[in-house]
Image (spheres, helix red, strand yellow):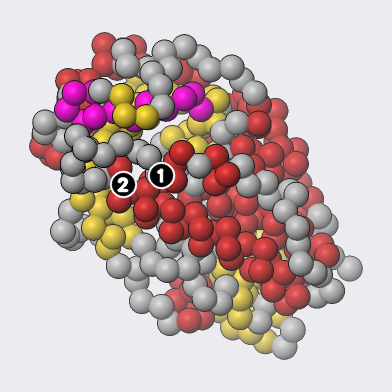
Amino acid sequence: MAQNIAIIGAGLGGLTAALALLRAGWRVRVFEQAAVLGEAGAGITVSSGAGKGLESLGIGPALLAASLPVPDIAFVHYRTAALLAGSFDKNAPPDFGFAKARHIHRADLHAILLDAVRALDAEAVVTGARLTGVETIGDGVVARFADESAASADALIAADGVRSAVRRLLFGDDSPPFAGQIAFRCLIPRHIAAPFMGAGNAVVSIGAGRIFNRYLIRGGALVNVIGIVRSQAWQQEGWSQPASIAEFAEKFEGFHEDVQGLIDCAPAQNLIKWGLFARPRAQHWAQGRVLLIGDAAHPMLPFLGLGAATAIEDGIVLARALAVAPDIEGGFRIFQRARAQRVETVRAESIRQGEIIQAADPDRGGLTGAPSQSPGLFDYDPCTITLDA
């Protein structure tokens, strides 16, 4: 008889796990604290391996249609725009499908996953469900919610992010510490951004304690803009706070005119900022029949653009691990053994990438030895890695 799995969190990792488990014959309920699932986030990178994993779940055509192949990225000097690494790719790159990484709006990928999950089970996703407690009873788990409802399952998967309620309830972990970085983000219509896009389709400007990244999404109609700057403090609550163009420009004073031009034409209504938070991966991802995945288990900084990809990888590998295990707890152990080294490598290399591209003196340092120049990090395939059963 098929067993029931409860998933906390309907983000990319939670929905990927739900889709993979539904396709493997599990009964799944995803509990999301937000009342409405809608347009959120901006551009993300789907690595080639994560793309192959999503393709294996039957959503390859939709993903290809909604995403763009990642062009060669130009890393440039913040002030002069002189090329430090990569190349100025001014033409649309060849589309090699999932053999290469792809750029997509997070909301588009989320919608594709949500539609695929609901196509298999229209009732699979429950919104407005804020978790308040997790209790193991016999061979099962009970999740309790703020509205005093409860859900019983044979296992529970926590995909509820870096501030995971499940991680706090299980292990007593405090809130993650501020990582000393503030990010700014906006989307600019390409026809407005065009005067400042002459250097190519994907450019990262690197300077002292600051980076500014922009690339195309949604068929080239939008420019995804993100700036990350070192900072001593972050006082605001929540993930997304309104930011002003003046504040954004001040943080990137001294950057070349293309950067200043993009900041000046940023739509004020969708310019936001948020603090980056980080902590070491959890030593133990499972307690009985409760398992942490994604940022709940192994949060990481965004400097390699692999945060979403590793959460997607988790969902794929988890379904594979449970398929070969004699029981749920055994599947969780197989999963952690299969994933631990991969995510720790990505986590550590993301930190190192940030340190290199935010170097104090970009006039003297290029990107030699930077993790972004190591293709192996991006070629990991969750469909083919060996599982130690």
Magenta stretch: give its range.
Answer: 70-81
Q: Residue 316 or 79: which is nearer the viewer? A: 79
Q: Is residue 12 magenta?
A: no
* Circles 2 and 1: CB atoms closer than 8 Å: yes
Q: Position of residue 290 (x, y in %)?
A: 62, 75
Considering the whole magenta stretch, tell me its main secondary structure.
loop
Q: Position of residue 85 (x, y in %)?
A: 37, 29
Q: Quadrant of the C terminus?
A: bottom right
Q: Amino acid at mark 1?
A: Gly
Q: Position of residue 216 (x, y in %)?
A: 43, 24
Q: Residue 174 or 38: which is nearer the viewer? A: 174
Q: Is residue 176 visible?
A: yes
**Which residue is label 2 attached to?**
356
Q: Secondary structure at mark 2?
A: helix
Q: Amino acid at mark 2?
A: Ile
The residue shown at (28%, 60%) is: 179
**Which residue is label 1 attached to?**
369
Q: Image height check: is 23 above or below 365?
A: below
Q: Residue 274 or 143: which is nearer the viewer? A: 274
Q: Image height check: is 171 above or below 200?
A: below
Q: Secondary structure at mark 1?
A: loop
Residue 82 located left or right of residue 280 = left
Q: Image height check: is 87 above or below 184?
A: above
Q: Position of residue 241 (x, y in %)?
A: 25, 48
Q: Residue 150: which quarter of the image?
A: bottom right
Q: Is residue 80 magenta?
A: yes
Q: Residue 95: which quarter of the image?
A: top right
Q: Residue 54 or 271: which is nearer the viewer? A: 54
